[in-house]
């Protein structure tokens, strides 16, 4: 291959990558705005779906304790969330399930179906008016997010999303514990 052919082939090979980079640089502001609206996807360690779901759920369930104080996570919980987010999220959901089962047991609603199916358990407690129906979608959404944490191979949301999940989980757990104590 002579020098001229080499230059032509090199130019052909570099044309699309150079055009793509040039367009990305020219439209970086528009691309940034477009990327901020993406609802699902992964780029490096960002998981848009999990983070957007936590954000929406936080808007639905105001993270206030029953007494009106803001939920404050224990420093050990925050440290654990940073070190091992998957384990911390799964533990938070298990604490909610334990509280839900305690409430169901106290009212004779713990059956074979409700013992092993958290969705059935939540619905049974809502039908019995032991949980406010307005919170049922919140419990279901938190459960879906827990499933994402449990089953996604590349699960690595932002620290803000993890802490948001934990605050919501604590709020819902406090709601259930309040229902147990009210009986």
Image (cartoon, rainbow, N blue to C red):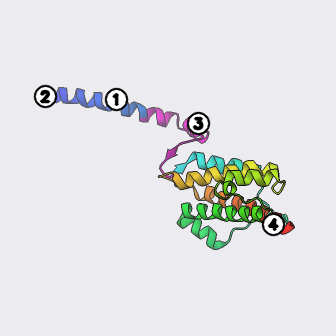
Residue hosting label 3: 34
**Label pair 2/3, CB-CB below 8 angstroms:** no
Secondary structure state at the residue bearing disc 4: helix
Where does residue 101 sit, x and y in percent of width and height?
Answer: 71, 62
Say whether residue 183 is magenta. no
- Which corner quadrant of the image does residue 86 belong to? bottom right
Q: Is residue 4 above or below residue 56?
A: above
- Tell me if residue 157 can be seen: no
- State left or right for residue 114 relative to residue 154: right
Q: Read off the magenta span.
A: 21-45
**Label pair 2/4, CB-CB below 8 angstroms:** no
Q: Earlier in the sequence, mark 3 or mark 1?
A: 1
Where does residue 48 sit, x and y in percent of width and height?
Answer: 57, 46
Residue hosting label 2: 2
Q: Is residue 147 above or below residue 14?
A: below
Residue hosting label 4: 180
Where does residue 36 sit, x and y in percent of width and height?
Answer: 60, 42
């Amino acid at each position: 291959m002579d020098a001229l052919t080499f230059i032509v082939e090199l130019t052909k090979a570099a044309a699309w990558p150079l055009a793509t980079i040039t367009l990305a640089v020219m439209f970086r502001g528009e691309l940034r705005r477009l990327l901020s609206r993406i609802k699902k996807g992964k780029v490096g360690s960002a998981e848009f779906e999990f983070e957007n779901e936590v954000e929406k759920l936080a808007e639905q369930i105001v993270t206030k304790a029953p007494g009106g104080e803001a939920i404050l996570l224990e420093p050990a919980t925050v440290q654990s969330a940073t070190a091992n987010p998957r384990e911390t999220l799964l533990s938070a959901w298990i604490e909610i399930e334990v509280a839900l089962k305690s409430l169901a047991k106290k009212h004779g609603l713990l059956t074979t179906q409700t013992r092993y199916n958290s969705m059935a358990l939540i619905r049974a407690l809502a039908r019995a008016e032991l949980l406010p129906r307005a919170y049922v979608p919140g419990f279901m959404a938190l459960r879906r997010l827990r499933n994402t944490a449990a089953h996604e191979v590349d699960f690595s949301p932002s620290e803000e999303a993890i802490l948001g999940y934990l605050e919501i989980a604590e709020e819902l757990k406090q709601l259930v514990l309040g229902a147990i104590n009210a009986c």
